[in-house]
């Protein structure tokens, strides 16, 4: 196994692990996006540019999901704080 193959195996394994852990925290969604970027780089370095393009797109999708999850979590926390401050909860 050469270094490029080992890098690709590590990148794809990281994608699988972080995808599995996404429900636990938004940070795992961000880590999944980074792993997708690593897999994309592997695809381009290996010469499989369609794989590289698809993984680049998946990275963008994951970044968007991270951003939406992060902002919705922040808004939910602000709403809870506001409700608590006025005695609604």
Image (cartoon, grey):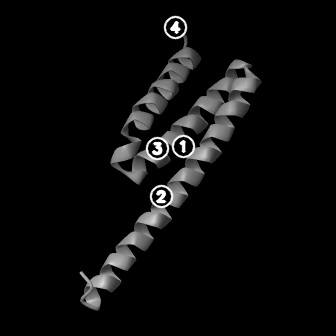
The front one of 73 and 55 is 73
Question: Is there a contact, CB below 8 Å, between mark 4 and mark 2?
Answer: no
Residue 31 has which mark? 3
Distance between mark 4 and mark 1 Cα atoms: 26 Å
Residue, disc 1: 33
Of the two numbered discs 4 and 3 on the same chain, state the one appearing first in sequence.
Answer: 4
Label 4: element kind: loop
Residue 69 has which mark? 2
Question: Is there a contact, CB below 8 Å, between mark 3 and mark 1?
Answer: yes
Of the two numbered discs 4 and 2 on the same chain, state the one appearing first in sequence.
Answer: 4
Task: Provide residue 76's location: percent of width, then percent of height.
Answer: 39, 70
Q: Residue at x 47, y 65 (%)?
A: 72
Q: Nearer the viewer, mark 3 or mark 2?
A: 2
Residue, disc 4: 1
The front one of 85 and 55 is 85
Question: Left or right: where does residue 42 sit relative to residue 13?
Answer: right
Label 1: element kind: helix
Question: Left or right: where does residue 77 sit relative to residue 71?
Answer: left
Distance between mark 4 and mark 3 Cα atoms: 26 Å
The correct choice, above or below, for 65 with respect to 47 in the image is below
Label 3: element kind: helix
């Amino acid at each position: 196994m050469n270094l490029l193959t080992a890098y690709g195996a590590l990148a794809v394994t990281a994608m699988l692990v972080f995808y599995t852990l996404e429900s636990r925290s938004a940070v795992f969604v961000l880590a999944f996006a980074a792993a997708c970027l690593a897999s994309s780089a592997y695809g381009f370095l290996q010469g499989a540019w369609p794989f590289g393009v698809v993984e680049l797109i998946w990275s963008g999708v994951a970044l968007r999901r991270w951003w939406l999850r992060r902002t919705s979590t922040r808004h939910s926390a602000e709403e809870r704080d506001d409700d608590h401050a006025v005695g609604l909860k």
